[in-house]
Image (spheres, rainbow, N blue to C red):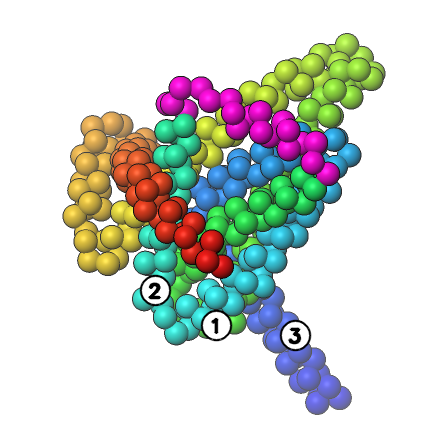
């Protein structure tokens, strides 16, 4: 009997350790994935454009296809790569982060550049023609998954860099896997809500049980185009801010600390001039604004490099292949 009680005590102890480990994994995943908030926001803001133009009954199936592709990107491709980096080449994390940060700066700056250029509706005409293509859905899904791969790589790298150095390989793997699932659910759950909101609003406006419900439905229908535009703006700003922040912090890790220290001093100096209750927010805001300005300038500098050097070289290799 005493042996059975001892065994039950051991099982209970193991269960407590397992529960604590699960809590640690989830806690580390949530904490680390929060560092990738900017890239996550951009992912959620970018995805709806791949779904517009399709019939209402195809919207959720398309979101589901992209979400499955996103999980495959994160769990099957990027997670093993992240674990190999963590185990054998942790020194590569900072340069890879900076490479991803450069991409974010370029993409964000390119969007800003297109907005500042005179209107060109040729691309819209082409899109309208392609909507008649029966293979457009699969093409759009593939394009969305490719875009997701780049953003997911950035998200996973940022999450990996945010994890404590003293975690063992299984904790790192578990935390990254949990973060990947949580982020994917959050992003594509939000996308599903966004793309179906106008349909829900239309149903409320036409078949609502009362005038108040119908009025709310009308507000939703009228407001969703503005919400989508706002998401594009927020996503672009987040992309530039995160990219600039990654470049500044990555440069500091590689030994070039002057930009990071200068930004820190400016933020602290300005924060001291406001009431104590908002000093932290002001310091963060100033840092974010300067990081975003750096990201925008760096991204604008990359545009001619990509257009006149990288793209032509990539095109040459593509033709040979």
Disc ID at residue 91: none
Q: Earlier in the sequence, mark 2 or mark 3?
A: 3
Q: Which residues are magenta?
A: 115-134
Judging from the image, what secondary structure is the residue with disc 1 in?
A: helix
Whole-number angstrom distance, CA of label 2 to CA of label 3: 41 Å
For the residues bearing labels 1 and 2, Cβ distance under 8 angstroms? no
Please name the residue that numbered disc 3 is placed on: 12
Disc ID at residue 92: 2
Residue mark closest to the camera, 3 vs 1: 1
Residue mark closest to the camera, 1 vs 2: 2
Whole-number angstrom distance, CA of label 3 to CA of label 1: 25 Å
Whole-number angstrom distance, CA of label 1 to CA of label 2: 17 Å
Place of residue 257 in the rendered image (x, y in percent of width and height, measured from the top left):
19, 51
Please name the residue that numbered disc 1 is placed on: 169
Left or right, residue 174 beside residue 132: left
Q: Is residue 133 magenta?
A: yes
Left or right, residue 193 beside residue 57: left
Q: Is residue 230 magenta?
A: no
Q: Earlier in the sequence, mark 1 or mark 2?
A: 2
> Residue sitting at 75 percent across and 88 percent down?
1
Q: Residues within 10 Å of mark 2 (few under 14, many from 20)?
A: few
Whether residue 264 is visible here, answered yes or no, is: yes
Whether residue 243 is visible here, answered yes or no, is: no
* For residue 56, above or below residue 21: above
> Residue sitting at 38 percent across and 23 percent down?
117
* For residue 79, above or below residue 114: below
Snapshot quadrant of residue 278? top left
Q: Earlier in the sequence, mark 3 or mark 1?
A: 3
Place of residue 223 in the rendered image (x, y in percent of width and height, measured from the top left):
61, 18
For the residues bearing labels 3 and 1, Cβ distance under 8 angstroms? no
> Residue sitting at 67 percent across and 45 percent down?
138
């Amino acid at each position: 009997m005493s042996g059975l009680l001892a065994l039950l005590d051991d099982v209970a102890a193991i269960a407590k350790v397992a529960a604590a480990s699960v809590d640690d994994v989830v806690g580390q995943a949530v904490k680390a994935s929060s560092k990738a908030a900017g890239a996550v926001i951009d992912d959620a803001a970018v995805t709806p454009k791949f779904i517009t133009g399709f019939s209402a009954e195809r919207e959720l199936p398309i979101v589901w296809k992209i979400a499955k592709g996103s999980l495959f990107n994160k769990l099957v491709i990027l997670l093993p790569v992240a674990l190999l980096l963590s185990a054998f080449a942790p020194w590569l994390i900072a340069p890879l982060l900076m490479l991803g940060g450069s991409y974010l700066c370029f993409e964000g700056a390119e969007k800003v550049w297109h907005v500042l250029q005179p209107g060109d509706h040729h691309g819209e005409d082409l899109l309208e023609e392609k909507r008649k293509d029966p293979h457009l859905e699969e093409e759009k899904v593939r394009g969305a998954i490719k875009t997701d791969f780049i953003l997911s790589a950035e998200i996973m790298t940022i999450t990996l860099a945010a994890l404590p150095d003293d975690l063992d390989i299984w904790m790192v793997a578990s935390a990254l896997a949990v973060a990947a699932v949580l982020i994917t659910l959050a992003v594509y759950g939000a996308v599903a809500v966004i793309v179906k909101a106008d349909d829900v609003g239309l149903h409320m406006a036409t078949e609502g049980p009362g005038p108040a419900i119908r009025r709310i439905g009308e507000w939703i229908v009228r407001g969703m185009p503005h919400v989508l535009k706002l998401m594009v703006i927020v996503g672009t700003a987040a992309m530039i801010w995160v990219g600039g922040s990654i470049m500044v912090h990555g440069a500091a890790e590689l030994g070039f600390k002057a930009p990071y220290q200068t930004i820190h001093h400016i933020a602290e100096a300005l924060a001291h001039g406001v009431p104590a209750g908002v000093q932290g927010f002001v310091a963060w805001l100033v840092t974010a604004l300067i990081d975003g300005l750096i990201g925008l300038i760096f991204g604008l500098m990359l545009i001619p490099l990509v257009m006149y050097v990288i793209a032509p070289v990539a095109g040459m290799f593509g033709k040979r292949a």
